[in-house]
Amino acid sequence: MKRKKLHIADNNLMYGNTPINLTKNEYLLVSVLLNSGGEVSCDEVKGAIWPDRKDIITYNNINQLSSRVKSKLIIAGCDAVITKNGEKISILVKEPRKLNKKDIVIYTLILISFPIHYYLSF
């Protein structure tokens, strides 16, 4: 089996031949990580995604964004780990795995519930 690769093509995130639909900020996070060899500082992430607001963006914002990206990558069949360790955030793409229906339902529910949780927190 040929190994699929997570890559950027024509400003779209692809996993093998599968396009992954991301928001602007999700795309910026992944592109910063991939273009830097898989690890960047949280300050670099803030500057790339929120240049005018980097002083008020918290680690929680970065954690929520990376969680949404990870869910979308997993739904696309890409087993990726996005971690924040102190001042660094990194991405590691593992060998592909086959998702069962339960996994797909769980990750879809995470994606659906995020906007509801976000708006209820205000």
Image: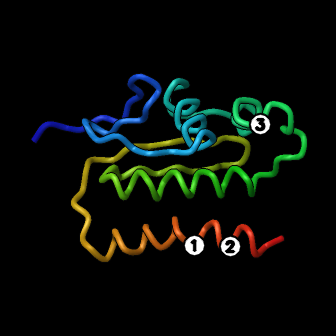
Residue 17 drawn at (x, y percent): 25, 36
When the figure is inspected, residue 4 is found, relative to residue 69, above or below; the finding is above
Q: CA distance from mark 3 to mark 1?
A: 24 Å
Q: Quadrant of residue 48?
A: top right
Quadrant where the image shows the C terminus: bottom right
Q: Is residue 115 left or right of residue 82?
A: right
Q: Residue at x 38, y 25 (%)?
A: 9
Residue of label 2: 117
Residue of label 1: 113
Q: Quadrant of residue 108?
A: bottom left
Is the residue marked by circle 2 packed among few (<14), some (14-19), or many (20+) residues within 10 Å? few
Tell me which amino acid carries mark 1: Ser
Tell me which amino acid carries mark 3: Trp
Q: Residue at x 30, y 53 (%)?
A: 77
Q: Element type at marker 3? A: loop
Residue 45 drawn at (x, y percent): 69, 36
When the figure is inspected, residue 96 is found, relative to residue 32, above or below; the finding is below
Quadrant where the image shows the N terminus: top left
Residue of label 3: 50
Q: Element type at marker 1? A: helix
Say if mark 1 contacts mark 2, CB within 8 Å. yes
